[in-house]
Amino acid sequence: MAHAETRLDNFAVSTRPAATSVSALAHIMFEAQAHAHPEHPAIHSSSGSLTYGQLNERANRLAHYFQSLGAGRETIVALWLRRTPWFIVTALAAMKAGAAYLPLDPTNPRERLQYMVRDSGAKLVVTDTALQQHASGVDCPLLVVEQLCDLAKDATDPLPATGPEDLSYLIYTSGSTGTPKGVEITHSNLSNLIRWHNDAFEVTQSDRASQLAGLGFDASVWEIWPYLAAGASLQLADVDTLTSADTLQNWLVSNEITIGFVPTPLAEMLVARAWPNSTKLRVLLTGGDALHVRPKPNLPFSFVNNYGPTECTVVSTSGVVSPWSNEALPSIGYPIQGSEVLILDPQLDEVPVGQIGELYVGGANVGRGYHGRPDLTSERFISHPRKPGTRLYKTGDLGRMLSDGSISFLGRSDSQTKIRGYRIELDEISAVLNSHPAVNASTVVARSDEADEKRLIAYVVFNEAATKSDLQDFLLKQLPEYMVPATFVVLDSRPLTSNGKIDCASLPSPQPDNVLADPITPAISPVEQNLSAIISDLLKVKEVGLDDDFFLLGGHSLLGTQLIARIRDSFGVEIPLRSLFEQPTVRGLAGEVERLLVDKINNMTEDDAQRELGRMNDSLTSNRPAA
């Protein structure tokens, strides 16, 4: 008989009831830890560290000041902040003030973040000095966090100002109407996540947990609050930590991380590696994308796959992934404590074991709904067919129950897709693209390439001429980079099925004669030509011009780490990942490579410099593309 993943056999299972009292709320549990262990380290980062006592005092000062500006129950404090201790101080302060916090990823387009602030009705926006100019122009008070603690002298714990069913945080996901939608999560929802997590993985004060996920991604919620509620320590990662599996592994080991979450693509690389005996890591959590690999045998930690929509407080199912199984792909595990997962047919009847149906989630982790969208809330949060007075969230995901009770994830049933762990509504991209004056109609699809990498392709019917860069620049003003298609296929009209719907199966594959392309500015210098050839091979595109953007050609951070490795092999210099984000074109990268090469040569003896120049000339000549 086929078996899938093991249950959390090595971990405790919570038997405590759902949160019904103020004492079970995240910020109140943190306060208890701060008073019991004020000198215990709470946050470590390259920009500073805080003990539980220091974190509590700073959050209290901000909370009192937020209250003086009108923050309280069911109000929103938006956090336009980077990954520093200030983010956690401010999120904690918002909850202590009785408000909910809205995390904003500062790498998203400014217009998109401003929309979220407006749509949420935020009472306040908090930013830092580095982002102050970027965050300007919002329609509510803009506060600079570094300046706030001097404005509030009261460091006492505010009186509890919220109950279990009040809002704890609001987080935005892609929406099919062309604008993102806000998901409302209550304190009771968050407490269920905390309670399950800390019991299931036996989190204690001695644990050191990682914080790696983007702050606008709901996994960051999971990475922060369970550990602060348990008295554990958080280690905040720098951007360079995610440059490669090697860098991340070294970071996890050197920082003595004991439990942490890593997005699926990187986690797949980590579990295939050898780990040193000194590894403190005991639990590696993953999720966000379909998991395609199993861990190597004899890893020093448990590898746990997780699944959950944002609407259901990050995690709905979880299971330890075994190195061995008769199932082709790892399952997404079992419903977590307090969660119910049903696999239903279109009539809302449960399908038999082994049959495919849609996943519905019920229980204590189901959020309140969509902010200001009662229509969409009623469509996706439905009445439970067998438990009157309770609700199920209709995920749009397909799955089947395996013989051992675990669940196999089989992808989407609608126009949503996952790109690099982000849930995307393809219709949102089309809606924004259709607002371009040159576009008559469009359809956006996600297709896998030869390496099973999903790429966005836009099929466009034009009513006037436009260039690829025109369309991408237009989209980048409203959408994050990962939602901007790398390829635009020109159509005279979109193919239709017999019932008038878009026939996606009949959309043509991208070909040189139907793809919209900008004029290519050719690379000239040997360094430029080698970089162009490297990027062309890595991204599987025919030609890369001097000013083509690596990310808009379909690149992303994981491919970026491969690009950096190839640059290191070809030129003998190490470019940090941040340089790729700052200079993502051949022209920009060539300037950075040349600068590093000059520095390298200048620091050598004359003989070593001559040998290095010879080696570089041979390397550049052999790798230069043929004329």
Image (cartoon, grey):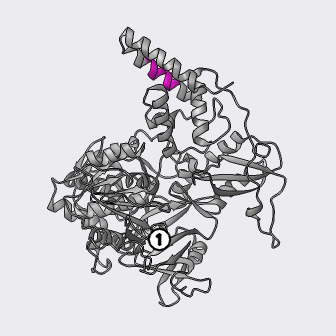
The foreground one among 41 and 146 is 41
Q: Position of residue 594 (x, y in %)?
A: 50, 21
The foreground one among 2 and 169 is 2
Q: Position of residue 532 (x, y in %)?
A: 60, 31
Q: Which residue is mark 1?
A: 327
Q: Position of residue 187 (x, y in %)?
A: 37, 70
Prevailing SS of the magenta stretch: helix
* Residue 525 vertical position relative to residue 384 in the rendered view, above or below: above
Residue stretch in magenta: 591-598
The foreground one among 77 and 369 is 369
Q: Quadrant of residue 23?
A: bottom left
On screen, residue 561 versus residue 513, left or right, reads: left
Q: Quadrant of residue 285?
A: bottom left
Question: Looking at the image, can residue 527 be seen?
Answer: no
Q: Position of residue 69 (x, y in %)?
A: 39, 56
* Residue 496 vertical position relative to residue 209 in the rendered view, above or below: below
On screen, residue 40 versus residue 175, left or right, reads: left
Q: Residue at 27%, 71% (x, y): give it.
A: 11
Q: Secondary structure at mark 1?
A: loop
The foreground one among 427 and 303 is 303
